[in-house]
Image (cartoon, rainbow, N blue to C red):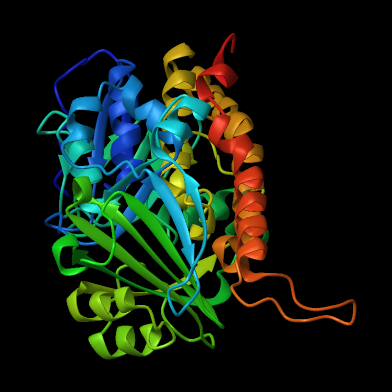
Amino acid sequence: MAPSITPPAANPAGPSVAIIGGGIGGLAAALAISRAGLRVTVFEKTRKFRDVGGGIQLAANGSRIAYRWGLADAIAQCAAQPNAFEVRAAHGKVLTRFAMGATYEEDYGSPHLNFHRARLHQVLLDQLPLDTVRLGHRLTDLTWDGEGPVRLEFEGAETFEADVVIGADGMRSVVRGRVAQALAPDDQTPHLSVPRYSGYVAYRGIAPAEAVSSLSPDTMYLWTGTTGRLLCYPIDCGRSFTTVVLESEPEGAPESWSASGSTEQLTAALSAYGDVAATQLNASTEQIRRWALYDRDPLDMWTSGPVTLLGDAAHPMLPHRGQGASQAFEDAVALSHCLAQADHDAKGLRAALVRYEEIRRPHTAVIQTGARGRGSLRIGGQPAPSDAGPAPDPAAAASSAVSSLVKEADWFQRYDIAGELDGS
């Protein structure tokens, strides 16, 4: 007989929830659902969490959730709260500058926060009981029928049964494929949604702030380029900068946010930027990653019986709106609320998953498709002349573009998932 995995002993009478994937979304869901009184086990395929990844942002809609979870003290030890956002031309001339910091927090009711991905991950991990996360468990299949539990199968012939399964296993989700098969066994494509290449690759890395002396560690920076853009913002309480260089490239790179990049690739991408800061970043940036930017069309459905999706597995989106982590946090809150309010029998739990999808799928679809609007790539430093007259002033054009982006993002940064759930 194949070995089985014993679930945690806490709350033995309550329903069991298995979360596939121990990234930001999976841990956020585990935290929210465990606090709702359900038994939670997270299965992560890697054998050890690594200190990899670049910067990650929580806008106000995400940070207010983190603070409600009681994470303020832990966040203060690792996040940066920028005081300004500055746009520069490729050669370094400042085109426009917008206040953030206290101004942003007063306007939106919660701060904009920047993290190293691994630090935010650790903040969430530290909130969970030690036996919640099972490393080295690569899911190979899951099956369910009727009103019985879901059977999970892992490499090595280990098995596990759970009343509810949450696929938080990223853009190339195994759970999503299995849900698609259950929903449309003869035609998976409309439910699976195939990868869609954006035309851009991001080269990312981390640089110590002391090595980039021309930049202030309390400011987010963006340089406009001819075919892309350079974004640099503080993380680790201002001790480091994350560097992101977006460049237009033909399709062909693998779909991976953690694929290794090279110093030669970063140097080539940064060659379009003449500012002294670009030279300093080129010399000091480490942990270089090459991220080909793919997304998918919004799914028709996320849920089949006792199985649903969360985070990138449900709504993989381009990073141009900086909403990946915040949307996963909102998913976690909505899902935990629906499960806590449900009757804890098979029928009630499955109805809770349907309710969760009804709340979240329309909202995330708008943000997911809106991220295709190219975000900061729309901020150009050298507007082309037209037949109507001379080209507009670059600074005025950049200021107008930033104002437009801020206006577009206003609604989802003000959004409070708790208000959506009131009375539900």
Measuring 59% from the left and 8% from the top, which residue is drawn there? 423
Pinpoint residue 304: horizontal percent, then vertical percent. Answer: 55, 40
Q: Nearer the viewer, residue 144 or 109?
A: 109
Pinpoint residue 188: horizontal percent, then vertical percent. Answer: 62, 61
- Asked if residue 185 shows in the view, the reply is no
Left or right of 397 in this view: 145: left
- Asked if residue 92 shows in the view, the reply is yes
- The answer to whether residue 405 is above or below residue 29 is below
- The answer to whether residue 57 is above or below residue 13 is below
Q: Nearer the viewer, residue 289 or 193?
A: 289
Quarter of the image where one finds residue 396: bottom right
- The answer to whether residue 153 is above or below residue 352 is below
Measuring 25% from the left and 57% from the top, which residue is drawn there? 138
Left or right of 408 in this view: 14: left
Q: Quadrant of the C terminus?
A: top right
Left or right of 286 in this view: 139: right
Q: Nearer the viewer, residue 93 or 301?
A: 93
Numbered-mark total: 0
Pinpoint residue 339: horizontal percent, then vertical percent. Answer: 44, 20
Quarter of the image where one finds residue 371: bottom right
Give the residue at the far top of this rendering.
423
Pinpoint residue 16: horizontal percent, then vertical percent. Answer: 30, 26
Measuring 52% from the left and 49% from the top, which residue is drawn there? 179
